[in-house]
Amino acid sequence: MKNLAYQSKKWNQVIAHLLEGEKIMGMGYQHEISELTEECAESSDYFRLCVCLANTYDMWAWEYLAKGNQEKVIQTTCMAVKSFFYACRMKKAEIPTKQIYTNIFSRMEDYICKAITTGCFDEFSDCYEDTIMGSLYLGEKEKAKKLVEQLPEIDEKRPEVYYIKPQFLKGIYNALLNQNEELLKEELVKRVKKYRKNMTSYATVIDFTTIGLLKTAKRYGMNVELDIAETPAFLKEDIDMEHFSALKIPFQDEMEKILKK
């Protein structure tokens, strides 16, 4: 297998673009979050708030990576994870919302990988029912295997960008379930080459899907190394969540009160 380049030819361009965007926007994401919380204070639409916050914090993490602020990358990713899974809890509890989001939960497996990466996994264990990554990380191999077998076939004609949907990870899941280190790395590299080649712009700056899979593989006694720019070394290390345990998303206390009713 040919070694994968540490970074694609587009990498320096996207980092420069992120830094330029941060320079132009300044406190843009903080202003965006302030506006979202102000709107929510009036509407109490916590579901919409959580969905929007998840996307905003995700983009913020990319900018912090470009600036080399590792602690802020972890912090904002944790906030994105919390926002996403509070939205999941709102949906499960059928909390009313004025907005209908049809595609947010298609990224469930990706956000579980973010939770695994940052050490937030246990906090949202109530959200992982019938998920492949949740089952894999918990060591429920038979359940994971059945879920993988149920995945739809890939439509090769349909263009993709991130390659984070479970059907695109089927070969990776099977290699992990069979504890085949060589095949696992081969399948991971194949996926990275696909998203580097096929994206319309550089859409994957931090590859949490790969990091989550690598950390899950370690739980199976597999030590696969994949040294690429999209999987920063500090995120592949064990992260001490005690340092970030006090983090709360806006209106988290209010949401918890509603969810307890």
Image (cartoon, rainbow, N blue to C red):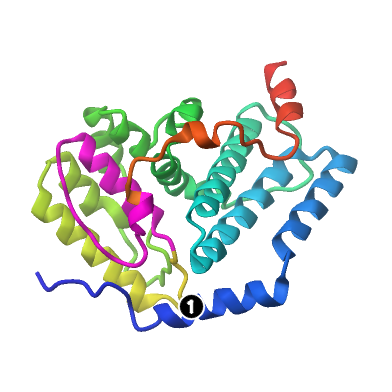
Q: In the picture, residue 159 is in which quadrant? A: bottom left
Give x and y (percent) for residue 29: 70, 61
In the rendered image, which residue does mark 1 sit on? 14
Q: Is residue 127 above or below residue 201?
A: above
At x 67%, y 50%, the residue is: 53
In the image, 107: left or right of 187? right
Location of the C terminus (image quadrant): top right
Magenta stretch bounds: 206-235
In the image, 103: left or right of 9? right
Residue 221 located within the stretch drawn in magenta:
yes
Count of numbered circles on the image: 1
At x 55%, y 53%, the residue is: 72
Residue 10 located within the stretch drawn in magenta:
no
Give x and y (percent) for residue 121: 43, 33
Question: Front-most of 132 and 119?
Answer: 119
Amino acid type at image mark 1: Val
